[in-house]
Image (cartoon, rainbow, N blue to C red):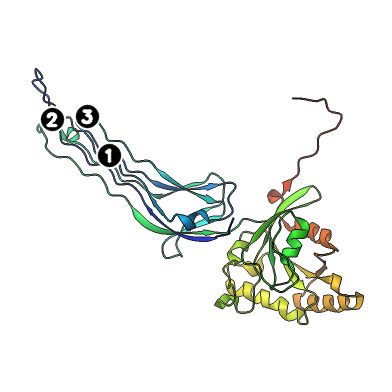
């Protein structure tokens, strides 16, 4: 399934049906009177956050969602049928923006959350509604209320516990593949991930979700490379893991490049809890490790962890450190295995 985190959608609610002008005229019925029914209500357009989705790819193939209008009223006091509602099923973490891409209509952060995007029009009144003691034969009815037509944007921000940051080829995909069942593309030649990948990581009977964000480069906030298109996915992360390539000749500059992009992006990303790790130490000897670590600690102004996604050296220590910085209510505890001595049950 392809990943898509931004989609433009056109929606329109249904218009209300017109009221009917009708009179009851039957043999032997002296005072029939007006009996025009009301028009039906138009269908509304809703958005609902559902479980099991992590992309907006469905909205690439269908961008128009038009609810049906209500049917007009009829004689014999019959009300027209209302139009059916339309529900846009979106992944949890989807932001719904107005056409200007700045006004937030709704933020879908919980499974089952529903938001009304366009209210269906009310059906018009039939002439039966206008009957009074002084006007017993009204010949007027209301037209139905028109539906609402609007353009909205859907922007997905993945809800993950840990977000991976780093330059291209810093080893983020290798790290994700080493600690989870995710299988992002990994190769022995330079390239960058083109879309985020999610993986569920387990350590010490606890699971949490890690998001591999495509690598940033200097000037990403100005649109260079893939730009900062995917930084929105780390806004909801509890902690960030900043991986730095230990084999690089410019370790301090590589670290500062990512920090600068976080600060330029804004939204307090630079202030999020962050863990810095020196990756690819399997390619370094003891002396090179010490020099690289000292250089990175001086640039980061704090402690730095050492790890290798290929040999898994230091991987468990990094995962435990991440677990300690994730809020307790976001952790998912594994179900304990049943006792083998327990009696069998169907």
Quadrant location of the N terminus in the rendered image: bottom right
Q: Nearer the viewer, mark 1 or mark 2?
A: 1
Distance from Cα at disc 1 to Cα at disc 2 = 19 Å
Inter-mark Cα distance, 3 to 2: 10 Å
Q: Is residue 83 left or right of residue 1?
A: left
Kindly state the secondary structure of the residue where label 3 is placed.
loop
Q: Which residue is mark 2?
A: 23
Position in image of residue 206 (x %, y %): 76, 49
Give me the residue at 21% from left, 44% from top. 143
**Residue tagged by mark 1?**
71
Q: How dense is the environment of label 3, judged by Cα within 10 Å: few (below 14), some, or many (20 and up)?
A: many
Do the residues under discs 3 and 2 have CB atoms within 8 angstroms?
Answer: no
Give the quadrant of residue 139: top left
| Front residue of 195 and 272 | 195
Residue 130 in sight: yes
Task: Decide if residue 257 is on the left or right side of residue 282.
Answer: left
């Amino acid at each position: 399934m392809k990943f898509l985190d931004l989609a433009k959608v056109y929606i329109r609610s249904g218009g209300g049906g017109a009221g009917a002008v009708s009179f009851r005229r039957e043999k032997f019925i002296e005072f029939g009177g007006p009996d025009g029914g009301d028009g039906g209500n138009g269908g509304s357009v809703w958005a609902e956050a559902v479980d099991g989705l992590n992309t907006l790819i469905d909205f690439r193939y269908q961008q128009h969602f038009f609810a049906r209008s209500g049917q007009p009223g009829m004689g014999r006091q019959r009300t027209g049928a209302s139009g059916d509602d339309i529900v846009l099923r979106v992944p949890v973490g989807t932001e719904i923006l107005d056409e200007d891409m700045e006004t937030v209509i709704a933020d879908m952060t919980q499974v089952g959350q529903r938001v009304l995007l366009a209210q269906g029009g009310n059906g018009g009144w039939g002439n039966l509604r206008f009957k009074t003691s002084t006007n017993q034969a009204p010949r007027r009815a209301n037209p139905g209320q028109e539906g609402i037509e609007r353009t909205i944007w859907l922007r997905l921000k993945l809800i993950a516990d840990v977000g991976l940051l780093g330059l291209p080829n810093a080893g983020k995909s290798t790290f994700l593949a080493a600690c989870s069942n995710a299988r992002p593309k990994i190769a022995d030649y330079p390239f960058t991930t083109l879309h985020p990948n999610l993986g569920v990581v387990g350590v010490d009977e606890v699971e949490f979700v890690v998001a591999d964000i495509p690598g940033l480069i200097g000037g990403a906030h100005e649109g260079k490379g893939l730009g900062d298109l995917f930084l929105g996915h780390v806004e909801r992360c509890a902690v960030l893991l900043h991986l730095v390539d230990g084999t690089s000749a410019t370790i301090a500059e590589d670290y500062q490049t990512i920090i600068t992009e976080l600060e330029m992006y804004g939204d307090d990303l630079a202030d999020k809890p962050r863990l810095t790790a020196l990756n690819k130490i399997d390619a370094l000897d003891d002396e090179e490790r010490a020099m690289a670590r000292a250089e990175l600690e001086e640039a980061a102004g704090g402690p730095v962890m050492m790890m290798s996604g290929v040999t898994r050296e230091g991987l468990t220590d990094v995962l435990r450190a991440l677990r300690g910085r994730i809020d307790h209510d976001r952790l998912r505890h594994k179900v304990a295995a049943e006792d083998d001595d327990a009696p069998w049950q169907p």
